[in-house]
């Protein structure tokens, strides 16, 4: 990133960045690994893609993400983004894509990454397939869960041993993690299998299926 691009990312003028560059680079360490070069920084690893520390709009979106998240604990960032947009559109002078990015980042700060042992400020979360009805996430009934499990076995049940073998190859250094993921996708035809699985599941239960986030610990 050039100094101008870095200043834009921080939401300040390039002149302001130049005057306070040492402190801003220290702050950047919270968001990425980088090496400082003449007139730019070379980002080598990103921790958090959105600068949020002193962003009032982001703080507002984060507050509303917590407020608008379904009381059932099961929701998606897209649906929450839509709820925030409908209710607070006059107060938000940002693009819809930015609102979605802020909502996703808010979810990560509030509840951490899915399946992470550390969690976030308000608890932890997992991913869960569910139905989407009238812009609400609804968990499967026992009958629908049985249908889902049967289809998972049909499309992915034979992948267990393949996953073990590929993981072993990664552990022994025969292949990289990136190559292992690519090989697994090809072996189980993941792209087509998932599409077929989802299409058949939606057909059998007569409803749209989405991947939602289940908040596991939070005081609503």
Image: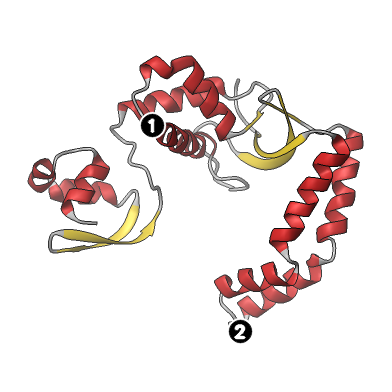
The residue depicted at 37 percent of the width and 22 percent of the height is: 92
> What quarter of the picture does the N terminus occupy?
bottom left
Q: Crowding at label 1, few (<14), some or many (≥20) Cα neighbours within 10 Å?
A: few
The residue at the point 69 percent across, 71 percent down is 186
- Report the residue at 51% width, 28% height from top: 81
The quarter holding residue 45 reads bottom left
The numbered disc on residue 203 is none
> Relative to the observer, which residue lies in front, 100 or 166?
100
Label 1 residue SS: loop
Q: Where is residue 191 in the image (x, y as percent from the top left)?
A: 69, 60
Viewer-side label of 1, 2: 1
- x%, y% of residue 98? 40, 35
Q: Is mark 2 on a helix, strand or loop?
A: loop
**Residue that badge 2 annotates:** 174
User: Mark 1 or 2 closer to N-term?
Assistant: 1
Q: Position of residue 59 (x, y in %)?
A: 37, 27
Q: Please name the residue shown 45% across and 23% down the image.
A: 63
Q: In this view, does 84 lie above or below 50?
A: above
| Residue 114 to residue 183: above or below | above
**Quarter that holds the C terminus:** top right
Quarter occupied by residue 96: top left
Q: How many marks?
A: 2
Q: How far apart are marks 1 and 2 (CA)?
A: 45 Å
Whether label 1 touches label 2, CB < 8 Å: no
Q: Mark 1 points at which residue?
A: 95
Q: Is residue 96 above or below residue 171?
A: above
Residue 196 in picture, x, y percent from top left: 78, 53
Label 2 Cα neighbours within 10 Å, binned few <14 / some 14-19 / many ≥20: few
On the rendered structure, is 136 left or right of 65? right
From the viewer's perspective, tell me whether residue 25 is left or right of residue 152: left
Foreground of the two, 134 or 50: 134
């Amino acid at each position: 990133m050039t100094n101008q691009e870095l200043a834009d990312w921080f939401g300040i003028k390039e002149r302001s960045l130049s005057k306070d560059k040492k402190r801003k680079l220290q702050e950047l360490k919270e968001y990425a690994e980088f090496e400082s070069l003449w007139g730019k920084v070379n980002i080598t690893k990103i921790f958090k893609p959105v600068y949020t520390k002193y962003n009032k709009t982001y703080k507002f979106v984060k507050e509303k993400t917590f407020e608008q998240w379904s009381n059932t604990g099961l929701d998606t960032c897209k649906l929450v983004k839509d709820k925030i947009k409908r209710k607070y559109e006059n107060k938000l002078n940002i693009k819809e894509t930015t609102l979605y990015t802020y909502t996703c980042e808010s979810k990560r700060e509030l509840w951490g990454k899915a399946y992470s042992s550390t969690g976030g400020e308000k608890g932890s979360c997992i991913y869960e397939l569910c139905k989407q009805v009238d812009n609400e996430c609804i968990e499967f009934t026992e009958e629908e869960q049985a249908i889902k499990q049967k289809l998972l076995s049909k499309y992915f049940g034979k992948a267990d041993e393949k996953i073990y073998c590929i993981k072993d190859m990664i552990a022994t250094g025969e292949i990289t993690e990136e190559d292992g993921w690519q090989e697994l996708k090809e072996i189980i035809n993941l792209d087509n299998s998932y599409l077929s699985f989802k299409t058949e599941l939606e057909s059998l239960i007569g409803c749209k299926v989405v991947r939602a986030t289940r908040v596991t610990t939070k005081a609503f």
